């Protein structure tokens, strides 16, 4: 297995007044070629910040420490012009809100072609043919007409399909999709999931799918990593993680998503309390204050991410479920 | 005669020439929760705003205990507003950042001149804070000091302090983390049970809608396409759109157990979502371009809402003529 992306002991922090806000804490992970890795976590868990660091899109105030390598490029040690040789072509990212990611006053066609002219040095007419072809691949009806339209003339689902198409124009080795369906309705979400599933196979492209929704991640990912308070707390192949969750937080997240086919229960499951703010200093396990299984040890000794005893299944918990 | 708390009849709302709501009608009984689902742009929030008289109705009637609210004077409406309260999706944005929590919650008591002294008001606020799971000790703090879930509790406290007879919730948990949503849902269920408030509950989160609602209403492009008791709607949905909607929800456990992913399951949903322009949509059934069972009649005639069983109404030509058999 060759890793297309490797993140090594990554820490990302920001200064806020006198305090240091640690958004990502000591995270290491690898994404293999053609693999789809799902990153699940709630707001503030550091999942977006980590991949903004990978893209080097964080503001100057961010302090990044550790190693990030994409396809042999040192993403932290390289100058902007070197980064730009991979960003937008071999390494691409799409976001939750396609409206703000598209330029409002340029046509869809102009924005798609620009990518190919800039990165693939194509002629405008060649780029136009490639853009048309891509709109068909992301199942946009009447693509000729869409090329001449502006972003506001498209529905949200169609805009997100345009964004996906744009991100795939240069055959990327890795697509980072940050909550790509969270602003969409479930029926449209299902379309986007299906498009991503088909295209990532066809293009043999690795994908990082960031989402708060375990269902969306399950539909696409080969492997799932769960983040809590800036750290990975559990990681396993999709089926194993969902069927044999070892971290109490993963189990709680699953419980909070009731099956629509199961009988209704009297109380909606939830977790008491809230996640710690990223500015809080940690002592022990960050999840301990909300954990039903927490013991004295959990409050002062932080559990390390380690093999659970089952292959490929890592968990950071002193008392994992099913152990 | 016993009137429902709220009856909406033939409601139409237009923005310019666009019909955002078209011939929508339903009843809401006192103490009942009606879930309202549909995709963005289907008119869910506009329906809520029309009921609150924040969006003008172009046609139809909105009856409160049998009286048509659309004929009321501004003064009458203002007096009435204490009975209808609203909570929003973004709890922080709906609170004034410069108003302490106590002032925000007490504001309805002041506006509606409840005749309480400042001290009595404060007592009511403190009790309300405790009731929504916050402590009276936080009363003098400001919204930015609270998490999203706590801000939503404050919003609920403010909406409920007048004990309204109708509470409209517009996506009240959508901006909250999954692990927090249940806390807010349970709080709303408890308050309703205790005080008998009727709720119109708008959400795209079907699990939450199923949990709270007695009945569920499905909107598609401004038209009511199906309404039924909650268990009927989730177990035996009839309208092709409702079926697509339910099939499109990805369930992690079922996917892990080998179920097809929603993209496969919802062949309807996988069809392009842009079939019809607004003008075309006003002729015939608005869902026809995405519908796997649409026939020629669906292109020319708007399907009327008809009872399939007591309490179960559907607007679909194909299910009506019985030529459609679901597996």
Image: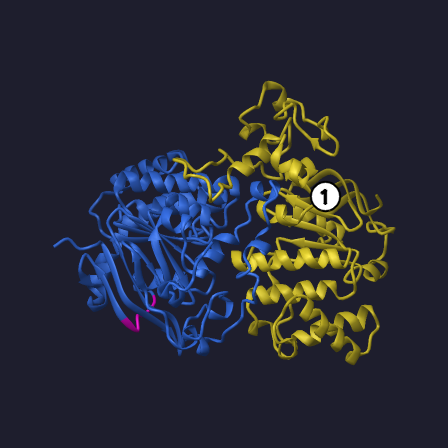
Name the residue that disc number 1 marks: A12
Q: Quadrant of residue A241?
A: top right
Chain A shade:
yellow
- Asked whether residue A22 appears in the rendered view, the answer is no
Q: Looking at the picture, does residue B251 appear above or below residue B277?
A: above
Chain B shade:
blue
- Asked whether residue A110 appears in the rendered view, the answer is yes
**For residue B192, side relative to residue A323 (left or right):** left
Q: Position of residue B268 (x, y in %)?
A: 53, 61
**For residue A32, side relative to residue B238 (left or right):** right
Q: Quadrant of residue A253?
A: top right
Q: Position of residue A24 (x, y in %)?
A: 69, 41
> Who is closer to the viewer here, A90 or B87?
A90
Question: How many tags in the picture?
Answer: 1
Subunit bearing disc 1: A
Residue B92 part of the magenta-drawn span: no
Residue B57 part of the magenta-drawn span: yes
Span highlighted in magenta in the image = B55-59
Question: Alpha-carbon neighbours of circle 1 within 10 Å: few (<14), some, or many (≥20)?
Answer: many
Q: Position of residue A59 (x, y in %)?
A: 71, 54
Q: Main secondary structure of the magenta part?
A: loop
> Who is closer to the viewer here, A13 or B266?
B266
Give the SS element for disc 1: strand
> Who is closer to the viewer here, B157 or A102?
A102
Q: Quadrant of the N terminus of chain B?
A: bottom left
């Amino acid at each position: 297995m060759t890793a297309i992306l490797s993140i090594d002991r990554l820490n990302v922090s920001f200064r806020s007044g006198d305090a240091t806000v640690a958004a990502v804490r000591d995270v290491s992970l690898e994404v293999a070629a053609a693999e789809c890795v799902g990153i699940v976590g709630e707001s503030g868990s550091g999942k977006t910040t980590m991949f903004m660091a990978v893209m080097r899109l964080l503001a100057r105030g961010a302090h990044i420490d550790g190693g990030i390598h994409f396809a042999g490029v040192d993403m932290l040690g390289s100058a902007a012009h070197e980064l730009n040789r991979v960003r937008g072509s071999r390494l691409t990212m799409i976001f939750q809100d396609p409206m703000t990611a598209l330029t409002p006053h340029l046509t869809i066609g102009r924005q798609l072609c620009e990518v190919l002219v800039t990165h693939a040095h194509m002629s405008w007419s060649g780029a136009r043919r490639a853009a048309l072809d891509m709109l068909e691949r992301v199942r946009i009806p009447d693509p000729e007409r869409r090329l001449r339209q502006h972003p506001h003339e498209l529905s949200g689902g169609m805009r997100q399909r345009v964004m996906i198409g744009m991100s795939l124009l240069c055959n990327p080795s890795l697509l980072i999709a940050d909550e790509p369906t969270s602003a969409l309705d479930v029926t449209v979400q299902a379309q986007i999931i299906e498009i991503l599933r088909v295209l990532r196979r066809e293009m043999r492209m690795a994908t990082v799918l960031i989402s708060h929704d375990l269902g969306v991640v399950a539909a696409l990912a080969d492997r799932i990593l769960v983040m809590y308070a800036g750290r990975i707390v559990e990681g396993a192949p999709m089926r194993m993680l969902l069927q044999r969750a070892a971290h109490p937080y993963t189990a709680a997240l699953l419980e909070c998503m009731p099956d629509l086919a199961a009988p209704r229960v009297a109380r909606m499951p939830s977790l008491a309390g809230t996640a710690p703010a990223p500015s809080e200093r940690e002592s022990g396990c960050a999840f301990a204050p909300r954990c039903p299984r927490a013991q004295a040890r959990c409050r002062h000794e932080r559990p390390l991410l380690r093999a659970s005893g089952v292959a490929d299944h890592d968990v950071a918990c002193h008392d994992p479920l099913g152990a | 005669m016993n009137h429902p708390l709220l009856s909406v009849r033939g409601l139409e709302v237009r923005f310019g020439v666009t019909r955002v709501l078209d011939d929508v009608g339903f009843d809401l009984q006192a103490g009942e929760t009606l879930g309202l689902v549909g995709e963005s742009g289907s008119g869910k929030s506009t329906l809520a705003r029309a009921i609150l008289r924040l969006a003008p109705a172009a046609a139809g009637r909105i009856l409160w205990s049998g009286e048509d609210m659309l004929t009321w004077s501004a003064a009458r409406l203002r007096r009435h507003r204490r009975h209808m309260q609203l909570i929003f999706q973004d709890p922080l944005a709906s609170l004034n950042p410069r108003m302490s929590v106590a002032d925000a919650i007490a504001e309805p008591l002041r506006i509606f001149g409840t005749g309480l002294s400042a001290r009595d008001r404060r007592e009511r606020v403190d009790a309300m804070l405790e009731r929504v799971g916050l402590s009276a000790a936080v009363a003098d703090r400001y919204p930015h000091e609270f998490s999203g879930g706590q801000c939503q509790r404050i919003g609920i406290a403010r909406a409920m302090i007048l004990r309204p007879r109708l509470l409209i919730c517009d996506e009240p948990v959508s901006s909250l983390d999954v692990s927090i949503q249940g806390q807010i849902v349970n709080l709303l269920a408890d308050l309703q049970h205790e005080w008998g408030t009727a709720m119109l509950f708008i959400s795209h989160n079907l699990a939450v809608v199923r949990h709270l609602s007695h009945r569920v209403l499905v909107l598609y492009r401004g038209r009511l396409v199906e309404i039924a008791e909650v268990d009927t709607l989730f177990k035996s949905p009839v309208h092709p759109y409702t079926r697509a909607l339910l099939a499109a929800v990805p369930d992690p456990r079922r996917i892990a157990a080998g179920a097809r992913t929603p993209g496969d399951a919802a062949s309807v949903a996988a069809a392009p979502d842009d079939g019809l322009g607004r003008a075309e949509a006003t002729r015939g059934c608005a869902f026809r371009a995405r519908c796997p069972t649409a026939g020629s009649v669906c292109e020319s005639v708007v399907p009327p809402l008809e009872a399939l069983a007591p309490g179960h109404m559907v607007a679909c030509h194909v299910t009506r003529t019985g030529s459609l058999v679901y597996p």
